[in-house]
Amino acid sequence: MTQQNQTLVKLENAGVLVNEKWLVRGVSLEIKKGKIITLIGPNGSGKSTTAKITLGLYKKIEGRVEKFTNKIAYVPQKINIDWTLPIRVNDFMNLTSNLKKEEVETALEITGTPHLKNKDLKSLSGGEFQRVLMARAIAKKPELLVLDEPVQGVDFNGEIALYELIKKISDTLNCGILLISHNLHVVMSKTDHVVCLNGHVCCSGTPIDVANNEKYQELFGKDISKILSVYEHSHDHIHNIDGTIEKKEN
Amino acid sequence: MLDDFFVRALLVGIGMALVTGPLGCFVVWRRLSFFGDTLAHSALLGVTLSYTTEINMALSVFVISSIVALILLKLQKKTNLPADALLGLLAHSSLAIGLVVIGLLATIRFDLMGLLFGDILAVNVNDIAVVWIGGAIILMVLKIIWKPLFASTVNYELAEAEGMNPEKYNAIFTILLAAIIAISIKMVGLLLITGMLIIPAAMARNLSDNPNQMVIFSIIGGLLSVIIGLFASLEINTPSGPSIITSGLILFILSLTKIKKKSQLNN
């Protein structure tokens, strides 16, 4: 695999104060090309907030955010579309970019939603809409992809397929991905770097590092945290000391 | 029989409908109907300003409406009040200030009815030029900002995250609204301008399933309202501005039958 260490976004000691309460504070992380970095942590620990800081959605922040790309795609956790708008999936796909017909169709194809192309957006089910959101983000061929719980509401088989897809996108498009996920199995098997949040960075590193970290075990409890350690054995790649990844031959 | 004044009225009305069609869609999509009203109310202040300083009426209305719109955008960020409360505050206070100023200018004869409801039959060649040139500029700007404006209408955060700069384009759109109010206030008056923006777009919503289609139907609805309304006012001698709006309403009611069929189909 080619080694790409180009930084896309860098957060230095970032934090947001809203109504005199710190949503999250002191977050430093770096998203690099071709790498998947995952944010984990309990509800209210600042995962979505960190994603939004990364995207520049907060006007006033503490610390620094440096962005080195403008080709960004975002799958938000919640999305409120105003249904006074008549809008089809096809229109939504082109929301922030001008895609060719084939690009739209390919993206819908790989997220399993080609039949929805001309459907009214409001007629979609929660899971279908989530897939379309993913398709839209992928179709843009971004350099930085921010996914905030991208598979919520998607059925079990679809969830696995979409996570496979995320991994594939990271490799084929060589884009950097910031992923928020509650699925620790996924975090373990698909991720290059894990940041465990709890209002601040509780611990961070490779999945193995985090799994073995005491603070992580305290936060998630002994039982759940074992999930990460178990995955150590089914790892399909090796993390070198310098942070690069080597594919393991089976 | 097409008298000269009637052709002028038609030309102005058609020019207006071409602009209110697409702008109206955004007003409906963004739930800005009350906002349009607020701008229209503040226009009264602009009109009185033009009487006192002898500046062109369209220009002074545009300036005042833009200022009110920008004050609103600022207030929304600075206070915790809901948008509709702020709109009410600005609408009524600017209307009140306008009326107070009129009171102070007791010496000037003031056609308040004409101002509230407009007089499209009294337009001159100059007005036609203002509507068509102003309208062309508005449409051109709208075309340029269409993509980011539409994206931010669908979802603000998504647009912002993906670098569409929604704040800037929202402000530009607000100024376009002030501009259409400025160029059309003489024709349909400040009470009916939001009707021209909303009714054709509302009708179009019933008939369309995608944004472009809605814009086209909205333009067609506006054009029909103008043409039917003006002919009605000529034939049965009704006031022209309200006739245009009433025609729009009839078209809207007709469009309801179409939406009914559609929902049955979906079930």
Image: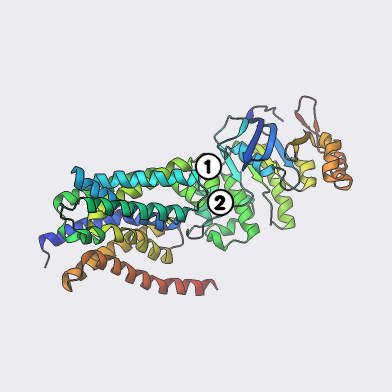
* Residue B235 visible in the displayed image: yes
Residue that appears at 40% across and 57% down: B34
Seen in the image, is A57 located left or right of residue B126? right
Q: Nearer the viewer, mark 2 or mark 1?
A: 1
Q: Among all residues in the image, which is located at the extreme top?
A: A242
Give the quarter of the image for residue A233: top right
Distance, label 2 to label 1, CA atoms, is 25 Å
User: Which chain is home to disc 1?
Assistant: B
Q: Chain of mark 2?
A: A
Q: Is residue A92 above or below residue A31?
A: below
User: Tag 1: Cα neighbours inside 10 Å, few (<14), some, or many (≥20)?
Assistant: many
Q: Residue visible at 40% across and 59% down?
A: B214
Residue in the foreground of this view, choosing between A210 and A49: A49
Which numbered marker is on residue A105?
A: 2
Q: Quadrant of the C terminus of chain B?
A: bottom right
Q: Label 1 belongs to which residue? A: B160
Tell me the kind of residue under disc 1: Glu
Q: Residue at x 44, y 45 (%)?
A: B73
- Side of A105 relative to A201 (left or right): left
Which quadrant: the N terminus of chain B? bottom left
Crowdedness near tag 2: few (<14), some (14–19) or many (≥20) residues, C-alpha within 10 Å: some
What element does badge 1 sit on? helix
Is A28 in front, or is B264? Answer: A28
Going by the numbered disc 2, the residue's amino acid type is: Glu
Tell me residue A186's x, y (percent).
77, 45
Residue positioned 59% across, 56% down in the render: A114
